[in-house]
Image (cartoon, rainbow, N blue to C red):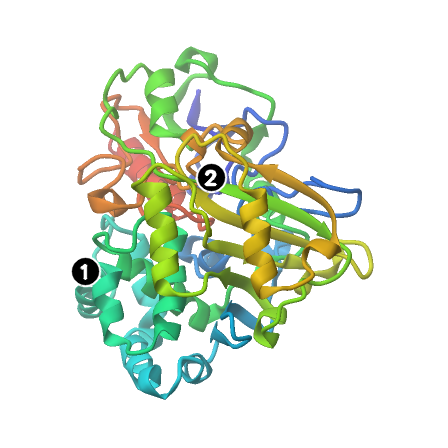
Amino acid sequence: MLDAVVVGAGPNGLTAAVELARRGLSVAVFEARDTVGGGARTEELTLPGFRHDPCSAAHPLGINSPAFRDMPLERYGLEWLHAELPMAHPFPDGSAAVLSRSVAETAASFGPHDAGTYRRLVAPFLPKWDALARDFMALPLTTLPRDPLTLARFGLAGLPPSTWLMRRFRDDRARALFSGLVAHAIAPLGGLGTGAVGLVFALAGHARGWPVARGGSQSISDALTAYLEDLGGAVHTNYEIKRLDDLPPARAYIFDTSPTALARIAGLGSYYERFRYGASVFKLDYALDGPVPWTAKEARSAGTVQVGPGSRDIAAALHAASREGRAPDKPFLITVQPSVMDPSRAPAGKHVFWAYGHVPSGWDGDLTDAVERQLERFAPGFRDRILARVTAGPPELAARNANYVGGDIACGAVSGLQLLLRPKLSLSPYTTPHPAVFICSSASPPGPGVHGMSGHNAAKAVWRRIRAS
């Protein structure tokens, strides 16, 4: 009998497996697809030689992850590559606000009225970022906070809606950039705890940047897999699980799946019926004949570029997708240009580029023209550089990854109490009514992102249960 079986070889499932194998337990991972990776894969989606990330591409939470930082993943090929600027937010006049590793440079890009405000906002947290990140990403607390005072201060700043926090800024340049940071949660800006989302992404960028993994996001998954196998763990692909009896006997079963799939496979009935899935995205992967011709020079040297004229435009786009059930006419875009940092991702002189806009759950329309019109506003001539494109709306995203119910790449709405208390209101969110069954996907705290912390936290819960038995 195995000590633990993990269902799903995404970053969280692989991290959970590694954490248990490091403790000397026998572990096996079962993955339905033919490769490991989940939301951290890399494929030639468009043309030969162009290597795209079908989902996550830039990794501010990955490089800052306490779980990943505690592992020797660099020995297994993981290398973080940085652009000159982690992120840029261009404006129609050709200027841009930036998220730089330097707080001073970032503040200066907002203009004189808001530079000091921004410095005062991040100053209490940045020197203590490592302890804060560990405490914040371990919620709900599995150990006592390392720095409870800083965590409490962060909560006071971040738990109110981001719209409250942004009242501190006088200029919309700062509000627009911060709105874009919050929009990574794919939820309206006025929700509880959205200020914390923006602060986490800003602090992560200042602390260690927003890098890509050399060779693509698949490198993260491959490094975790290689480390697990060196620890004695096994990974089985092309192995779809429909019920618990499909798995070998084990003392614990850990699911890196949606709550819906877990309930179906483990026979938990309506246990997760109140779990909410959120809005989706319409994603485009491009093979380009050259770099994106951004008007703003800062955007040309940034790894991630947010595309939205102002904070009201961003709020309207998110509200349309999340609350009104329609695709926005002028979508807010999150874009990543990996080949700016990693030329190996495309043939010489060519580039790969990634963009998505927000759409309602299950939406089956085509946002391509709206996305490219928005890009042309900030990068005139963009369409002329397109060699090939692949589009993926909610149906395609859900078909590629079963965790993306309705195309929700966050594996559950990141809004309301579900921002922190997911997948249920519980002090032990990784456990289920079945004493041997656990959940470790992005549906559990701390939520979406390629950081492995949901798997790390779930592994602690499994370890405690096994040790007590």
Looking at the rendered structure, the secondary structure element under dot 1 is: loop
Q: Rounded to the nearest whole Å, what is the CA distance between mark 2 and mark 1?
A: 39 Å
Check the image and report above or below for 93 versus 142: below
In the rendered image, the vertical position of residue 284 relative to residue 87, given as above or below: above
Given the current orientation, which residue lies at the most extreme bottom position?
112
Q: Which residue is mark 2?
A: 21
Q: Quadrant of residue 339?
A: bottom right
Q: Which residue is mark 1?
A: 160
* Residue in the foreground of this view, choosing between 353 and 176: 176
Residue shown at 69%/39% (left/top)? 45
| Residue 74: % across, % down | 60, 57
Instruction: Report the side of 442 relative to 38 (left or right).
Output: left
Residue 252 placement: quadrant:
top left
Quarter of the image with the C terminus in it: top left
Residue in the image at 41% along x and 57% along y: 66
Q: Which one is earlier in the sequence, the residue at label 2 or at label 1?
A: 2
